[in-house]
Amino acid sequence: PANVYCEGDANSISALGADVFIGGSNSIAANDLTLVAVSMPPNTFGLMARSPQQASAPVGNGTICIGNPIVRMDLVQSDLLGQVIYYVDVTAPAPGGPVAVGETWNYQLWYRDGASSNFTDAVEVTWCD
């Protein structure tokens, strides 16, 4: 299913940083996976990204937890509560190609935080049919 890893660093609104978790399932047939990010600054832009690799390297005010190759997915914006709900549509053409049964992908949100940037923690998803 899914495994959250690589804790996010403190940001301008939370000493614990922003978190990402999943809703729905890891089933390609169900096509109902959502990535939910919380504790972000309100009305801030970010970039959802995925990679088959995990990493841990300081960037900006946070830690990037996904490694090369990094596939940029979509630009998102947090709401007034500092939340993003991102629907992963496995039927749509996706940057980096579609996901396949048995593949494991790591997802993370990179977002603006004041004059710098930060990251959520990351989530590992192994896809099934």
Image (tube, rainbow, N blue to C red):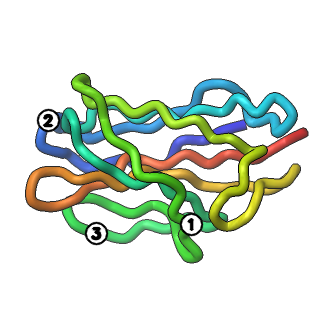
Q: CA distance from mark 3 to mark 2?
A: 18 Å
Label disc, if present, on residue 59 of the rendered structure: 3
Identify residue type, mark 1: Val
Position of residue 80 relative to residue 71, above or below, is above
Position of residue 118 relative to residue 31, above or below, is below
Kindly indicate whether the residue at mark 1 contacts the one at mark 2 (C-beta within 8 angstroms): no
| Quarter of the figure with the N terminus | top right
Estimate the x, y position of residue 123 in percent, counting from the top left: 55, 45
Badge 3 or badge 2: first in the primary sequence: 2
**Tag 3 secondary structure:** strand
Identify residue type, mark 2: Ile
Estimate the x, y position of residue 120 in percent, counting from the top left: 37, 47
Label disc, if present, on residue 106 of the rendered structure: none
Estimate the x, y position of residue 76 in percent, counting from the top left: 39, 45
Label 2 or label 1, whichever lies nearer to me, is 1
In the picture, residue 41 is in which quadrant? top left
For label 1, the residue is 71
For label 2, the residue is 13
Identify residue type, mark 3: Val
Whether residue 8 can be seen here: yes
